């Protein structure tokens, strides 16, 4: 069953040396676009994590954030640059002395200065990397489950709409023969009147030719056949879960083309009304499909 591109996932991990929380939010998008918000110390793992994400999704805008709390700085390979901090404090004190003022360092602000922290390794500790990857997979599973729930609701709604489209197309199919009879009778009467007005002799063979031409112009049997095929295909795709969004979008375009042709060829107010209802329902389907992966 198709899944929605909109969803939310979360996974929390607590261990002796660290704690981390993954959060995933996604909305619809034509292609898969992953945006990461990661601590600087673990950004080297992003490429590998990107491959993991692509096993869970193929389309959509996906925002992934990691909140990492370290209980042991050594695990990350990060150390405080104490000599640099001391040199900064000393120079600020000397500057303050020049102006006969006192200087008291704000250690909280210094802790937030990235220049005072050194990353002693390009890769985090293997145990932490494994824990983070497992946490990401847990969040992805939770995220996919939320998308499945919404996908089931959307599929149910779309199937109901396709059923309604089928009813409308059947009404058009019933009306078309009636339209043909009305148009044929009107054409026959009009030609008789014209021939009588000029004193010409009525020609049945010529009449049959004109009726055949009219019938060909108004006949939408091929369009209705293709329309029924597209509706069947829509139901079939809604029962599957791979690349459903792109297939549904294409099928809706083809369905719109066929129903539009029916409306143009029929030249009947009742058929036109049915076509308008069909297009309105089709547009609601299109809006739903925009959010299906």
Image: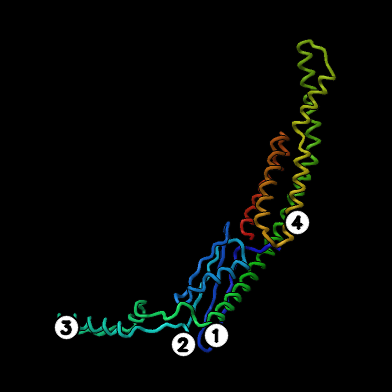
The residue under the point 44% across, 80% down is 121
| Viewport quadrant of the C terminus | bottom right
Which residue bears the numbered disc 1? Answer: 14
Quick one: label 2 or label 3, which is nearer the N terminus? 2
Q: Residues within 10 Å of mark 1 (few under 14, many from 20)?
A: few
Residue at which label 4 appears: 236
Is the Cβ of the residue at disc 2 closer than 8 Å to that at disc 3?
no
Q: Say whether disc 3 or disc 4 marks the residue closer to the N-terminus.
A: 3
Badge 3 is on which residue? 97
Q: How many marks?
A: 4
* Residue 189, placed above or below residue 19: above
Q: Mark 4 packing: few (<14 Cα in 10 Å), some, or many (20+)?
A: few
Q: Which residue is mark 2?
A: 72
Query: From the viewer's perspective, is the residue at label 2 or at label 3 nearer?
Result: 2
- Where in the figure is residue 214, as x and y percent of width and height? 76, 28
Whole-number angstrom distance, CA of label 2 to CA of label 4: 54 Å
- Quarter of the figure that contains the N terminus: bottom right
Question: Which residue is pictured at 72% across the width and 58% down the height?
Answer: 238
């Amino acid at each position: 069953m198709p899944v929605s591109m909109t969803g939310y996932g979360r996974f929390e991990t607590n261990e002796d040396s660290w704690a981390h929380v993954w959060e995933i939010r996604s909305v619809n998008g034509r292609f898969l676009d992953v945006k990461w918000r990661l601590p600087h110390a673990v950004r080297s793992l992003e490429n590998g994590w990107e491959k993991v994400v692509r096993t869970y999704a193929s389309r959509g805008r996906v925002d992934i954030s990691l909140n990492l709390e370290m209980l042991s700085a050594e695990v990350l390979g990060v150390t405080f640059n104490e000599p640099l901090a001391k040199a900064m404090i000393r120079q600020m004190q000397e500057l303050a002395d020049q102006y006969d003022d006192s200087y008291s360092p704000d250690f909280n602000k210094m802790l937030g200065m990235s220049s005072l922290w050194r990353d002693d390794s390009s890769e985090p500790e293997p145990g932490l990397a494994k824990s983070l990857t497992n946490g990401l997979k847990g969040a992805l599973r939770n995220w996919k489950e939320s998308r499945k729930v919404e996908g089931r609701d959307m599929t149910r709604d779309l199937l109901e709409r396709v059923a309604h489209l089928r009813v409308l197309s059947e009404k058009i199919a019933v009306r078309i023969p009636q339209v043909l009879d009305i148009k044929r009778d009107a054409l026959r009467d009009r030609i008789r009147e014209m021939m009588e007005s000029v004193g010409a002799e009525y020609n049945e063979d010529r009449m049959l030719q004109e009726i055949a031409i009219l019938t060909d112009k108004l006949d939408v049997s091929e369009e209705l056949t293709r329309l029924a095929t597209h509706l069947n295909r829509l139901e079939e795709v809604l029962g599957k879960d791979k690349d459903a969004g792109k297939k549904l979008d294409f099928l809706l375009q083809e369905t719109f083309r066929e129903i539009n042709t029916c409306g143009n060829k029929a030249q009947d107010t009742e058929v036109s009304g049915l076509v308008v209802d069909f297009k309105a329902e089709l547009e609601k389907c299109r809006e739903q499909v925009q959010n299906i992966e």
